[in-house]
Image: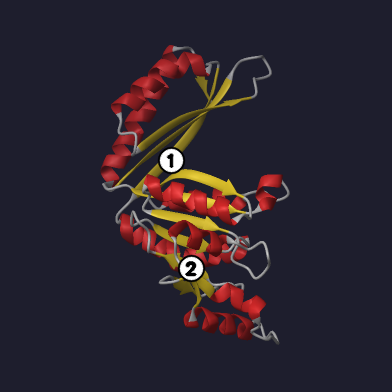
C-alpha cells in the first residue's frame, strides 16, 4: 500500500500564546489517520509572512503528498497565509474571478449588505494558478495551490473550526479517501494493573520489530497508580491496511501475544 502522507501547518499568534487551543490540528490529524493517511508533522507559526514562507518551503522539501494549512485567510491585517505561501513559492498574488464570485455567494447566503471594497477583496487575492474552494459556512474561500517544486499539494483552510471542518469534509476528505483507496483500521485498548512500562518494554520492542511499522501501532499510556499502589497502564493497539482480513489477523495476533506476556508477568487485565 502506498502511504499517503500529509503535514499540517497552523497559522496564528493566538495558538503560540496559549490564548487559543489548537483543536484544528487534532481534528485534522484524526480525520486523515482514520482515512488511511499518515500525518508526518504538525507545525505552528505566527502571523508573519517570512515565518509562513519558511515553514512552507521546509515542508515541501520533506515532500509530503499534501501540506494542509489552517488559519490566516481572512480580511484583516494579520491574515497573511496566502501572502506567505506566495513568497515561499515565488508566486504573485492576483485577484481571482472565481474567488470574487464565491465571496458574493457567501454574503448573499447570509443576507449581508456589503461593498466589495479592497478589504474584502483581500480574501479573493490568491497565488496565481491556484484554485479557490467555496466556503459553505463562512466567507473566505479556501485555496488549493499545486505549483510547488516537489509536487506537494497545498490546501489552505480557514482557522475558524466550523468553517475548516465543513470545507474539509465536503471538498478535501473525499479526495484523500479516493487517493488512499480501500483502507481498514482496527483499534482496541485495554487496562492492565500490576505491570510497569519497563516490564513490558521487551515484548513491545519485539512486536514493533516483527510488524510493519506503517501498518501497526502499539502504545502504552501510564495511568495513576491503583489504590493499593500498583502501576496501571492503558495499552493501545492499532492495525491498518488495505486487506480487512490481514488487518484483523495482525490486530488479534498482537493482542494475543500481549495478553500472554501480561499473564506471564503477573499482571491483571481489567
Question: What is the x, y in percent for residue 123?
Answer: 58, 73
Q: Could you tell whether 246 is left or right of 84 in the image?
A: left
What residue is shown with label 2?
143
- Tell me the quarter of the image containing the C terminus: top right
Please say if the residues under marks 2 and 1 sit with CB atoms less than 8 Å apart: no
For label 1, the SS is strand
What residue is shown with label 1?
187
Q: Could you tell whether 16 is left or right of 194 in the image?
A: right
Disc nearer the start of the sequence (2/1): 2
* Display colour scheme: secondary structure
Q: Nearer the viewer, residue 85 or 15?
A: 85
Q: Quadrant of residue 90?
A: bottom left
Q: Nearer the viewer, residue 263 or 96?
A: 96
Q: Nearer the viewer, residue 11 or 138?
A: 11
Q: Could you tell whether 263 is left or right of 165 in the image?
A: left
Local crowd size for mark 1, using a 10 Å CA cut-off: few (<14), some (14–19), many (≥20): some
Q: In this picture, is 170 found above or below 238?
A: below
Q: In this picture, is 38 found above or below 209?
A: below
Residue drawn at point x = 61 percent, y = 83 percent: 109
For label 2, the SS is strand
Q: Nearer the viewer, residue 92 or 243?
A: 92
Question: What is the x, y in percent for residue 183?
Answer: 33, 51
Residue drawn at point x = 48 percent, y = 68 percent: 143
Q: Quadrant of residue 136?
A: bottom right
Amino acid at each position: 500500500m502506498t502511504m499517503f502522507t500529509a503535514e499540517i501547518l497552523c497559522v496564528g499568534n493566538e495558538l503560540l500564546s496559549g490564548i487559543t487551543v489548537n483543536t484544528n490540528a487534532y481534528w485534522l490529524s484524526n480525520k486523515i489517520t482514520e482515512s488511511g493517511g499518515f500525518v508526518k508533522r504538525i507545525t505552528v507559526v505566527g502571523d508573519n509572512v517570512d515565518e509562513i514562507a519558511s515553514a512552507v518551503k521546509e515542508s515541501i522539501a520533506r515532500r509530503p503528498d499534501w501540506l494542509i494549512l489552517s488559519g490566516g485567510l481572512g480580511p484583516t491585517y494579520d491574515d497573511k497565509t496566502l501572502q506567505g505561501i506566495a513568497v515561499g513559492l515565488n508566486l504573485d498574488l492576483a485577484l481571482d474571478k472565481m474567488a470574487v464570485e464565491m465571496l458574493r455567494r457567501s454574503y448573499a447566503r447570509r443576507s449581508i449588505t456589503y461593498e466589495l471594497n479592497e478589504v474584502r477583496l483581500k480574501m479573493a487575492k490568491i497565488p496565481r494558478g491556484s484554485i479557490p474552494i467555496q466556503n459553505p459556512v463562512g466567507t473566505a474561500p479556501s485555496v488549493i495551490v499545486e505549483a510547488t517544486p516537489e509536487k506537494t499539494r497545498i490546501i489552505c483552510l480557514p482557522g475558524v473550526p466550523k468553517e475548516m471542518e465543513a470545507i474539509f469534509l465536503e471538498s478535501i476528505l473525499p479526495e484523500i479517501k479516493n487517493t488512499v483507496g480501500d483502507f481498514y483500521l482496527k483499534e482496541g485498548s485495554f487496562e492492565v494493573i500490576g505491570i510497569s512500562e519497563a516490564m513490558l518494554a521487551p515484548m513491545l520492542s519485539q512486536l514493533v520489530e516483527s510488524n510493519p511499522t506503517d501498518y501497526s501501532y502499539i502504545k502504552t499510556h501510564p495511568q495513576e497508580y491503583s489504590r493499593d499502589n500498583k502501576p496501571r497502564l492503558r495499552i493501545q493497539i492499532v492495525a491498518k491496511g488495505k486487506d480487512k482480513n490481514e488487518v484483523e489477523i495482525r490486530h488479534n495476533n498482537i493482542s494475543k501475544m500481549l495478553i500472554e506476556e501480561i499473564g506471564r508477568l503477573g499482571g491483571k487485565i481489567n
